[in-house]
Image (spheres, grey):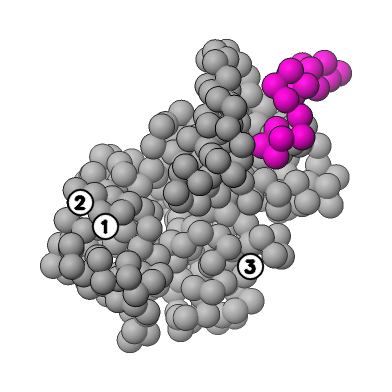
Amino acid sequence: MKVCVVGAGSWGTALALLLARNGHSVDLVAHTDDHCDALRRDRENRQYLPGCPFPENITVLPKPLNDDPDFTLIAVPSAFVGEALRTIEPGVICLASKGLDPETGVVLSDLAEAIHPKAEIVAISGPNLAVEVAGGIPTAAVAASHTEDAALMIREALNGLSFRVYISDDLRGVELAGALKNVYAIGAGINDGLGFGDNTKGAFLSRGLAEMSRLGLALGARMETFLGLSGVGDLFATASSKLSRNYRVGFALGEGRSLEEAVNALGQVAEGVPTCEVALRLAHKHGVNVPLMQVLHEFMHGHCNRDEAIRRLMERQTLRES
């Protein structure tokens, strides 16, 4: 196939490498001219994925050629997905970004459909840390779309010895699970940064999954999606790995750094930070109870300290598990 990958950060580069190794012709679009020049010169992404040389079938470009690719894959931070979508032509669009549109609060497929009403939209999500995908370490993902043929195309393009793709028609659920899990991955990092134990993290993540699911159901997703690769699978990977940007931001917060310090030290976007803002607005709008997310937000922004966060969560009235 001929594929255009928009976004040459760690995730976009990892997917470009995966596609190229599967034998496809890949145009990798960098965000700036300087980054494009560096990628062309070095034939690897030394800024985000050093040590992973580009095969010959990756071409680095400063903008999409729009020369009728089989599909276009978007892998930029959620805040820039709209901008990226406006640079491409409609067709099959695969959204690999995991977040919510910060301006409108919609899932990214809604944004894509508003910009390209005739496009066939697919979202891909799962326990897919970029460094491991680029390194050929086995994992799996789910490709979701309202158009089965489009989901099957993405499955065919990405399937291989190190990457197994399942398909789903719960597009909204896969997107929400992939976005919301980043919020609770920050909380898992805070847990470890504070020096709390595995019991605390296990309890936090299980209740976080309950919150994710409640909000997802209120927004039209299906429960089983949150128990699959884009939910439990991605939550487990992102909340337990030091490769995870969201975990690392949380760990720095737990150690006492401010949110600004934690994000600046990371040097990349941690999607859980803006997603928390948007998801809280959605939860309040739809009347969904998300106490963990609320306390996380306040802790991240310095509005409550460790002891206050513990007191507020542990002294809440105990109800039936749901």
Residue 281: give x, y in percent of width and height: 78, 51
**Secondary structure of the residue carrying numbered label 2:** loop
44 with respect to 303 (left or right)? left
| Amino acid type at mark 3 | Asp
Disc 1 from disc 2: Cα separation: 7 Å
Which comes before the other along the chain, label 3 or label 1?
1
Which comes before the other along the chain, label 3 or label 2?
2
Question: Residue 8's quadrant in the figure?
Answer: bottom left
Mark 3 in CB contact with mark 2 (< 8 angstroms): no
Q: Is residue 219 above or below residue 195?
A: below
Q: Quadrant of the C terminus?
A: top right
Which comes before the other along the chain, label 1 or label 2?
1
Residue 10: give x, y in percent of width and height: 36, 53
Q: Is residue 206 visible?
A: yes
Residue carrying label 1: 45
**What label does residue 110 carry, if any?**
3
Q: Is residue 228 visible?
A: no
**Secondary structure of the residue carrying numbered label 1:** loop
| Amino acid type at mark 1 | Asn
Which residue occupies the extreme bottom position in the image? 67
Q: Residues within 10 Å of mark 2 (few under 14, many from 20)?
A: some
Span of residues in magenta? 299-322
Near-viewer residue (193 or 142): 193
Q: Nearer the viewer, mark 3 or mark 1?
A: 1
Disc 3 from disc 1: Cα separation: 31 Å
Residue carrying label 2: 52
Residue 137 magenta-highlighted: no
Q: Is residue 96 above or below residue 306?
A: below
Mark 1 in CB contact with mark 2 (< 8 angstroms): yes
- Residue occupying image coordinates x 86% and y 18%: 317
48 with respect to 135 (left or right)? right
